[in-house]
Image: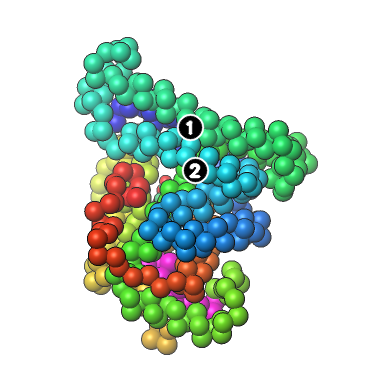
């Protein structure tokens, strides 16, 4: 685990150790993406959704790209107020390029330096030290992805809730003032939500009976009166159960994000020394047979009572998928409501079927997140 330079390519929230800088950034993030700010987030999602639906209609084979554009569009709108589609496309490309190096670096053993730590001290041109060049370039791309939308928005004087002031009334820096250091909202929010949504298309083709039951629920409730909205969620328990099962069935961050113990401790009889790196095996927890019988089967019913309502006593995969402790995902509420509205809209308008020559299983890339 020596490739620190590259791991820190995005010196944002996720790679930061606990400390003042981390606490301030997390606080700003939570203020901006606070559940009380839901109307702002929901407006952003509503604006981006038609583009997703049109893209799926025009080009169903390219659903992954459509998902990505949708989430990047939503997140750059929420974070920086970026509105124009061509700019969203530009940032989508920059995002992809910027994310690749840290995603690779996060897998222990990806680079020779993980095995021969002394390579850290050799120059960039030295054989085996290619990671240094990648780290430098990755860092530059990450910085551009963080800075450019901020500069663009300031130049255009976009007036939105995000941009009305750089400082809040009490003189503290407002979210956007530090947004350039918080490109995490994009990194963390896009990659994970897109990955989960990608599996949605796959599961619908593999489990047509789930798709039909969901469409029946939507038809019965909506009676052909347009698309479901966020406030309809309590009336659509099966759709909510699909979102839960998507999070469980294929956790997109299968080994979580590495945590580090800040002191010596004993857990369940095991001594864990200070500074240990701890990986939470979210994949194993999500597939635990005792909690989730027949874990490999995509079964939204597992979260429902016999009369089809959400079962409060059923295990909740959200408590695994979004991580643990003080680093628990601060965007989980945005992810859940975005997935609810997206899954509802897609199932109201489309029926997904398998195309023989396309096997999505073979196209999954693994890394910190599966994609
Ligand atoms: C299906 C969607 C999502 C999943 C599965 C997911 C999962 C996770 C996980 C596993 C972590 C690491 C938690 C830990 O260290 O224990 C995390 C952290 C984080 N997530 Fe999410 N996330 C999702 C969506 C989002 C969204 C939409 C946003 C932003 C709007 C977001 C922002 C963040 C941030 C900023 C962190 C770092 C928190 C910290 O280190 O304090 N995530 N997420």
Left or right? Give the position of 280 relative to 144. Answer: left
Q: Residue at x 37, y 58 (%)?
A: 61
Is disc 2 placed on a helix, strand or loop? Answer: helix
Q: Residue at x 38, y 86 (%)?
A: 306
Tell us which disc is closer to us: 1 or 2.
2
Residues at discs 1 and 2 in contact (Cβ within 8 Å): no
The mark that comes first in sequence, 1 or 2, is 2
Residue 306 showing in the rendered view: yes
- Name the colouring of the figure: rainbow
Left or right? Give the position of 345 relative to 297. Answer: right
Residue 243 colored in magenta in the image: yes
Name the residue tied to disc 1. Answer: 142
* Residues drawn in magenta: 234-245
Q: Residue at x 59, y 69 (%)?
A: 230
Outermost residue toward the right in this view: 169
Q: Main secondary structure of the magenta part?
A: helix
Residue 105 colored in magenta in the image: no
Residue 339 showing in the rendered view: no
Q: Residue at x 40, y 81 (%)?
A: 213
Is disc 1 placed on a helix, strand or loop? Answer: helix
Tell me if mark 1 has few (under 14), some (14-19) or many (20+) residues whose alpha carbon lies within 10 angstroms of its own. Answer: many
Left or right? Give the position of 276 relative to 116. Answer: right
Name the residue tied to disc 2. Answer: 92
Question: Residue 8, image x and y in percent?
Answer: 42, 30
Left or right? Give the position of 248 relative to 180. Answer: left
Q: Label 1 to label 2, Cα distance in Å?
A: 12 Å
Question: Residue 234, image x and y in percent?
Answer: 54, 76
């Amino acid at each position: 685990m020596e490739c620190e330079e590259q791991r820190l390519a995005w010196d944002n929230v996720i790679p930061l150790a606990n400390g003042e800088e981390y606490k301030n950034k997390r606080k700003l993030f939570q203020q901006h993406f606070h559940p009380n700010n839901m109307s702002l987030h929901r407006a952003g999602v509503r604006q981006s959704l038609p583009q997703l639906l049109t893209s799926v209609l025009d080009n169903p084979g390219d659903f992954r790209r459509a998902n990505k554009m949708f989430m990047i569009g939503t997140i750059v709108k929420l974070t920086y107020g970026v509105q124009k589609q061509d700019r969203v496309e530009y940032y989508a490309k920059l995002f992809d390029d910027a994310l690749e190096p840290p995603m690779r670096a996060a897998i222990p053993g990806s680079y020779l330096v993980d095995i021969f730590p002394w390579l850290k001290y050799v120059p960039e041109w030295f054989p085996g030290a290619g990671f240094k060049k990648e780290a430098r370039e990755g860092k530059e791309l990450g910085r551009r992805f963080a800075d450019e939308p901020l500069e663009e928005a300031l130049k255009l004087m976009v007036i939105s809730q995000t941009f009305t002031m750089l400082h809040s009334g009490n003189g503290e820096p407002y979210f956007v003032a530090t947004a350039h250091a918080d490109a995490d909202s994009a990194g963390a929010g896009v990659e994970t939500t897109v990955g989960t949504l990608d599996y949605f298309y796959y599961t619908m083709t593999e489990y047509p009976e789930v798709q039909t039951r969901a469409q029946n629920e939507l038809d019965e409730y909506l009676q052909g009166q347009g698309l479901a909205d966020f406030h309809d969620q309590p009336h659509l328990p099966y759709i909510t159960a699909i979102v839960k099962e998507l999070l469980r069935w294929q956790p997109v961050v299968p080994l979580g994000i590495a945590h580090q113990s800040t002191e010596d401790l004993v857990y369940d009889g095991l001594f864990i020394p200070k500074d240990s790196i701890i990986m939470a095996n979210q994949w194993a927890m999500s597939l635990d047979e005792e909690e989730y019988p027949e874990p490999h089967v995509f079964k939204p019913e597992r979260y429902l009572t016999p009369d089809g309502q959400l079962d409060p006593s059923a295990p909740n995969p959200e408590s695994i998928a979004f991580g643990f402790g003080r680093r628990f995902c601060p965007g989980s509420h945005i992810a859940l409501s975005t997935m609810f509205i997206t899954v509802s809209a897609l199932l109201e308008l489309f029926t997904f079927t398998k195309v023989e020559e396309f096997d999505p299983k073979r196209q999954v890339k693994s890394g910190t997140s599966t994609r």
